[in-house]
Amino acid sequence: IHHSVFSRPTDTWSQFSRQVLIRAMSSSGPTSPYTTLSICRPTPSITHVELHRPEKRNAMNKAFWREMVQCFNEISDDSDCRVVLVSGAGKIFTAGIDLMDMASDVLQPDGDDTARISWNLRRTITKYQETFSVIERCPKPVLVAVHGACVGGGVDLITACDIRLCTQDAWFQVKEVDVGLAADVGTLQRLPKVIGSRSLVNELALTARKMYADEAKSSGLVSRVFPDKDALMAGALEMAEEISARSPVAVQGTKINLIYSRDHSVAEGLDYMALWNMSMLQTNDVMKSAQASMEKKSPKTIEFSKL
């Protein structure tokens, strides 16, 4: 379906076309060369990444940890892509780490002595951390649509995303203490930045209790809750379209500076912003956007160059 469909006001036709796109996004299998991910383009500027091991409840095996890095590195360099939407195939978003597949890496590390075993284990852990850090480093905004369970590594994944949406039946669980380890690929570092209450973060991480959609919304883990997966995907796609219609210079600069500001003082963030915009303000996108605004036109009517 041509991108021009989305330049029209929201009406019965655009709602119908969105439903057609959502059905097309529900793939029948992984996209080569991947074995755990299905990749498609619902519009020319939106990339849909679907976790695709539905028969294994999208459990994260060795291939998944490798393929996410490759996938998001490619997306980062893809000038056609302006927004990414992540979802899960099948009945749930993800059951988390595939313990059976990963056991040899984590429980039987190589090495002749404690020092060498530790060195190799650290290398393994940092490699797995990269799987989700690559999402955060991707300059394109990443929306994640969660339905059903989001367990363990799933929480690590979604906290590296920019916007989190879920269904009413979604639930979240920091599962790691239940399997005898401290979460080590992002949850303990990112969840406190996402949820305002340090007490709630500690409770979730230390008890491994489930958090359901209403509490996830009230605590700030997700920003919207939808009645079912169809409504979720329609809402996520509509939001992705809104973002993709804006200047990629503005959108990607906003994401990069939001993340920088999260990890630095206000003064450092302002200084970085000034350095950033001293070059990024020198773009035609500002005049194009201002003119459209003065003419009361939607950003969707503007043609921005690729970035």
Image (cartoon, rainbow, N blue to C red):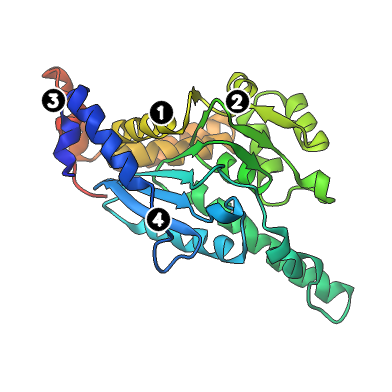
* Along the viewing direction, whichever of 301 and 99 lies nearer the viewer: 99
In the image, residue 111 lies at what x, y percent?
81, 79
* Along the viewing direction, whichever of 67 and 258 lies nearer the viewer: 67
Numbered badge on residue 291: 3
Q: Does dot 1 land on a helix, a strand or a loop?
A: helix
Residue sitting farthest toward the bottom: 112
Q: Does dot 2 land on a helix, a strand or a loop?
A: helix
Q: In this view, does 157 lie to the left or right of 46?
A: right
Q: Does dot 3 land on a helix, a strand or a loop?
A: helix
Residue 208 position by quadrant: top right
The disc, 1 or 3, on the residue closer to the chain's N-terminal end is 1
Please state which amino acid type lies under the numbered disc 3. Gln
User: Label 4 belongs to which residue?
Assistant: 28
Disc 1 to disc 3, how far (Cα)?
34 Å
The disc, 2 or 4, on the residue closer to the chain's N-terminal end is 4
* Along the viewing direction, whichever of 162 and 22 lies nearer the viewer: 22
Numbered badge on residue 231: 1
The disc, 1 or 4, on the residue closer to the chain's N-terminal end is 4
Please state which amino acid type lies under the numbered disc 2. Ala
Q: Is residue 262 left or right of residue 227?
A: right
User: Label 2 belongs to which residue?
Assistant: 213
Disc 4 to disc 3, how far (Cα)?
44 Å
- Residue at (53, 56) in percent of width and height: 53
Q: Are marks 1 and 4 in contact (CB under 8 Å)?
A: no
- Residue at (69, 45) in percent of width and height: 152
Disc 1 to disc 4, how far (Cα)?
20 Å
Tell me: residue 153, above or below residue 13.
below
Disc 2 to disc 1, how far (Cα)?
15 Å
In the image, residue 43 lies at what x, y percent?
25, 44
